[in-house]
Amino acid sequence: MSTNIFVTLNSKINRKKEMEATQKGVTLEDLQKHKSTDFLPLNGTDYIEFYVGNAKQSAYFYQVAFGFELVAYAGLETGVKDRASYVLQQDKIRLVLTTSFDPESEISHHVRKHGDGVKVLALWVDDAEYSLRVTTEKGAQTVHPLATTKDEFGEVKTASIQTYGETIHTFVERKNYTGVFLPGYKAINKTFKTKSIGLKYVDHCVGNVGWGEMNKWVEFYENVMGFKLLITFDDSDISTEYSALMSKVVSNGNGYIKFPINEPAEGKKKSQIEEYIDFYKGAGVQHIAVATDNIVETVSELRNRGVEFLHVPDTYYNDLLDRVGLIDEDIEVLKKLNILVDRDEEGYLLQIFTKPVEDRPTVFYEIIQRKGAKSFGKGNFKALFESIEREQDLRGTL
Ligand code: FE2
């Protein structure tokens, strides 16, 4: 809470400084040179919206399998004639699932081309107008201009810019809104109650982009959105006998938003990134990492509910303690649940990856518990990629 207040204050101070400077004929460019602070303050992930073929059934999957609660809905019953959207929430994670009734709509086109996939990575801001202006002045392409929507709970301002593939970022300013999600959505009082499985917040969202495009998108996040390059992985870090990828992680000023960007690299056989691009028909969101405070409980519950995970062989656990040192968890329990562990200078992390949650081998989830570590599990890459290759081999796409 205190961090958010700080971010809000900081943003207001920056905005005031910027307005004063602009009035004095100083360009934004000049201002940036002298301003060490973040020019695009972000409070966190606001929501992640999927365009899907059947939102009602997808919503059921996220409730029953992942423990999300259905909190809001927009559709025919609420006066929306062309689509249905379900809003699911678990702690700070908010997913929106949208289906169109019109076969010619942009939503239907998206689903026909990509299958079910992420359309919007929405970012919570204090000032949507400023966020759109500062990013478009630096080269972002506007997808949806600034819009103000209102209902009895107040108003929300939104604006969207393009990122990789057909994915967009929507800036959401909700400081004058007390409703459940956005104007137009109605809160749901359900008789069917779901139980949280301990998912807390979005840790990072990974994008897959085409051959040779990683640096272009890293530069986009650096130059247009003020992100910083956090880590680089090349094919010597991430390669197996068969496939390889390259990855760079960018993060915003306060570190609340982390976007690793992957591109395929040459290997003996087809890279998992190339497989994704082939099936998604272009660049898009590869995985969403969600944090838990107790990965053993969360993953046990997910497995009980039928969620499938990538399998690493038992041999992974043979030298685990030599690699990561002492950990709080029982290795036998981790082995049984197939949870992976990695350590960096600051601590360790536990992680596991689901199989794709769509029919196409595209989007999947990572469940992560951080115990000090701020990295992304580099020590697990080889074991993981060999596991993905076994799955690719079963699909005939290796
Ligand atoms: Fe990840």
Image (cartoon, rainbow, N blue to C red):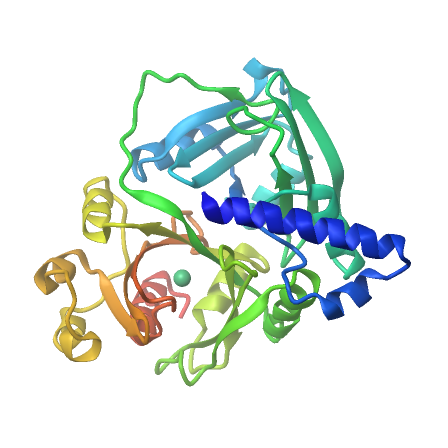
Q: Which quadrant would residue 150 be assigned to in this image? A: top right
Relative image position of residue 322 (x, y in whole percent) = 15, 80
**Which residue: 15% across, 62% down?**
328
Seen from the viewer's position, the closer of residues 115 and 306 is 306
**Which residue: 91% across, 59% down?**
25
Task: Locate the N terminus and report the quarter of the image it occupies.
Answer: top left
Q: Which quadrant would residue 392 be assigned to in this image? A: bottom left
Q: Which quadrant would residue 160 be assigned to in this image? A: top right
Identify whether 351 is placed above or below 175: below
**Where's ligand 1: which quadrant?**
bottom left
**Which residue: 41% across, 77% down?**
243
Left-right relation of 316 to 381: left
Q: Looking at this view, name the residue that lies furthest to the bottom.
A: 236
Relative image position of residue 291 (x, y in whole percent) = 35, 51
Relative image position of residue 300 (x, y in whole percent) = 18, 47
Residue 115: in sight, yes or no? no
**Which residue: 18% across, 73% down?**
316
